[in-house]
Amino acid sequence: MVLAPKLVVKQSQQLALTPQLMQSIKLLQFSSLDLSAYVEGELERNPFLERDDGEQSSAQADASSRNDASEHGEDGFDRDLVMSQMETSQEGLASQLDADLSSVFTEERSQEQLEARSASKEEQWQLPSHGITGTESDYNLEAFVASNATLADYVMEQAALALPEPVDQMIAQHLIGFLEVTGYLQFDEIEVAELLGTSPAHVLQVLAVLQSLEPSGVCARSLKECLSIQLREKDRFDPAMQALVENIELLAKHKLAKLQQLCGVDQDDLADMVREVRDLNPKPGNAFGGEPVQAIVPDAVVKEAPDGGWQVELNTDALPKVLVNQTYYSTLNSSSHDRKDAAFFTDSIQTANWLVKALEQRAHTILKVATEIVRQQDGFFAKGVQHLRPLNLKAVAEAIEMHESTVSRVTSNKYVATPRGIFELKYFFTSAIASSEGGEAHSAEAVRHKIKTLIDAEDPKKILSDDALVKALKLEGMDIARRTVAKYREAMNIPSSVQRRRVKNSALTN
């Protein structure tokens, strides 16, 4: 056998991930907000992309008709020709009117008046407090809207009056920088003292002043300190109350007998003390709110069809609408003789066409996946979460003849509005729990819902343990282990049977 180099023509197929294909895959997993931000960036970069507002064509037609009317007039006269024949200078007007206009109007004086009037308007619209200037054309009423006062601003205003020394104000400003939305401070006084060149005692002295400000309990470093500050202001921080605050974790566990022993009070006094503590504000900064909550924009809407089924529609408000301006491209490309400009125009028009097609494909894929999910989970929409079926990505991918990775990207950060609320598409994919009777498997979400229902309906005198929950679920046809019940219960932040018994017994006592 002789080994020798040779040329061979071979035909094969392979998948090449081009940049546009990779970007199309990235568009699939974008949320509606991320997609809007991406499209806005493309609209700024690409000259051939424009928004599809639906009113642009009519507005352009109205503008062109107004331009034609202003140029030729409704009676057919050419206004440019008429205006060019009119005398506008001082000599021409004086000869036509047979009058002396030197004391009435001069070109030099008119120019000075226009410049002075323009300068006065610019000075009129200067807003030094906001650091912006403008004229009548860019006047923005929103510039006068007051911003929401933050907790840090509110505390700093009080600190400026409570701390007259500039050094103390500087320390207070640094400490307020650590202020959380809830009103708590988390810092190390030794590190702050070294950074500001002072002593830790000085830092704690300024902190004590900050803790005396409003709202009551602000700038506390822990829950116990926050409650102590509020009780001191009410003159209720006696030794018994101090012992209660120091052992506040026992109150959370409803170990009232232990608390009663530590505080040295009887049952009635302890009940009054507990009521006082519960009336306090554990998060004093919440009154000022925080960042505005971003509303969820559903990508699809599920409605009940006239035939009793379910109809899935895309939410058009969540879909960016863009168009490709082919006319503008033809105009620029025909008038350009530079190779660089021509290459830029060609690349931009290709990118614009690709983006429009990619957005259409993304919307079609979302609708296809959402429709299949609704078809397989019709029991949930008709009867509730207890009828949610086990479902995985593979079942949906096989039904719509797509890859599992595509379905995973489509269902990430996508929401659907249903008659039962707004849910993420991932919510409908749950693992299967075997049936104790050999029938159809149950969804893990349905099992969690059943556990919560049993616990909510339990008798305060007969609290259900995890073993009792296992037996109750088995009677419902759900074969589940005790450790799985405990895992689901902890995931729903439901305490154990011992803790629930203490809570409900204390409620009955009060």
Image (spheres, rainbow, N blue to C red):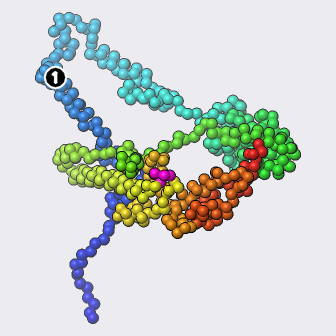
Q: Quadrant of residue 68?
A: top left
Residue indicated by mark 1: 73
Q: Would residue 473 be found to the left or right of residue 132 on screen?
A: right
In this view, 15 is above or below 71: below
Magenta span: helix, strand or loop, mainly? helix
At horizontal 29% and vertical 39% (from top left) the residue drawn is 54
- Viewer-proximal residue among 1 and 495: 495
Mark 1 nearby-residue class (10 Å; few <14, some 14–19, many ≥20): few
Residue placed farthest to the bottom in the image? 1
Estimate the x, y position of residue 40 in percent, counting from the top left: 37, 45
Q: Can you give x and y, in whole percent of width and height, for residue 9 in the image?
A: 22, 78
Q: Give left or right: position of 504 versus 294.
A: right
* Residue 382 forms part of the magenta stretch: yes
Residue plotted at (37% across, 59% down): 25
Q: Secondary structure at mark 1?
A: loop
Say above or below: 185 vs 431.
Answer: above
- Viewport quadrant of the N terminus: bottom left
Q: Is residue 267 magenta?
A: no
Camera-side residue: 462 or 249?
A: 462
Residues drawn in magenta = 380-384
